Image: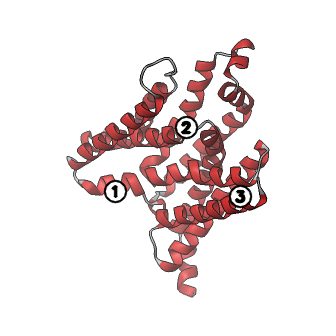
């Protein structure tokens, strides 16, 4: 027990907890909109585009953070476009982007100094390995994204779920759509090279999915989603430290268990 407490009190574990808290708050909040807008795999595709940007940066000696954000913003601009009048279904385009940049990430990383180790890190990441100086940067970015998102939540909701009314009221729907993807892609781009694609994708999907099964009002859904993410983060970190398990996988399993329990509860109560 004393050894576990010593490990838990280490600066590395405490920094991981701090990073997990802000990721849980922002990811849980934004994830509700991602799930309600039915753009779950856009989040995965943006994360994969960012991963390709990091792989390219590592290969040619660029700054990974800058490259990831640049790629993420380019992907955001692409997905913000309206594909309703095109012959190709939007889902097919998302799949094509995801597959293309997945392959590109592997190819670029394979030419790097560490080869497939870089691919593994981009996918799974390691929240315990986040440098102390990165913690403050992630918190500042997270709070900025959260503040902007909260201030503009009504506009995002209106444009997302009643575009015709929004246009009638004078909103430039495509511009607002781009703003949403811009924040989503920017946040993913900043954190993906630190904690990995899988964890970011998990934060955007699992907490919100469980919350939607047990709550109906948007404010309650958001609250439950953020709580799910926080509980999954803390539980995952604690369990991974106690049993020496991979941290990312343990956190995702904890969030998945919460989602499963809430899904069953929602079905039993008829919500």
| Residue position marked by numbered label 3 in the rendering | 267
Secondary structure beneath disc 1? helix
Q: Earlier in the sequence, mark 1 or mark 2?
A: 2
Q: Earlier in the sequence, mark 2 or mark 3?
A: 2
Mark sitting on residue 39: 2
- Foreground residue, 76 or 208? 208
Secondary structure beneath disc 2? loop
| Alpha carbon separation for disc pair 1 and 3 | 37 Å
Q: Residue at x 65, y 28 (%)?
A: 160
Mark sitting on residue 120: 1
Is residue 126 positioned above or below 178 on the image? Answer: below
Q: Residues within 10 Å of mark 1 (few under 14, many from 20)?
A: some
- The reply to whether dot 2 and dot 3 touch (C-beta < 8 Å) is no
Q: Residue at x 29, y 42 (%)?
A: 103
User: Is 181 displayed left or right of 54 in the figure?
Assistant: right
Q: Position of residue 159 (x, y in %)?
A: 67, 25
- Foreground residue, 69 or 171? 171
């Amino acid at each position: 027990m004393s050894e576990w407490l010593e490990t838990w009190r280490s600066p590395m574990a405490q920094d991981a907890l701090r990073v997990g808290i802000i990721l849980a708050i922002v990811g849980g909040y934004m994830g509700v909109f991602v799930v309600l807008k039915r753009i779950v795999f856009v989040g995965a595709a943006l994360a994969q585009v960012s991963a390709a940007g990091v792989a390219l940066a590592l290969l040619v000696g660029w700054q990974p953070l800058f490259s990831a954000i640049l790629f993420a913003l380019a992907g955001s601009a692409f997905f913000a476009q309206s594909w309703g009048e095109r012959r190709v279904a939007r889902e097919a385009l998302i799949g094509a982007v995801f597959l293309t940049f997945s392959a590109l990430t592997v190819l670029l990383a394979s030419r790097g100094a560490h080869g497939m180790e870089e691919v593994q890190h981009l996918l799974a990441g390691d929240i315990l390995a986040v440098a102390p100086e990165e913690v403050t940067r992630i918190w500042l970015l997270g709070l900025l994204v959260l503040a902007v998102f909260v201030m503009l939540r009504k506009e995002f909701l209106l444009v997302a779920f009643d575009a015709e009314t929004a246009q009638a009221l004078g909103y430039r729907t495509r511009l607002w759509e781009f703003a949403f993807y811009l924040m989503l892609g920017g946040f993913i781009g900043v954190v993906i090279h630190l904690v990995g694609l899988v964890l970011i994708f998990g934060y955007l999907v699992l907490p919100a999915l469980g919350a939607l099964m047990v709550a109906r009002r948007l404010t309650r859904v958001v609250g439950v989603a953020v709580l799910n993410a926080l509980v999954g983060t803390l539980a995952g970190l604690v369990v991974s430290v106690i049993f020496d398990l991979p941290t990312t996988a343990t956190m995702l399993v904890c969030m998945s268990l919460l989602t499963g329990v809430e899904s069953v509860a929602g079905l039993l109560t008829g919500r």
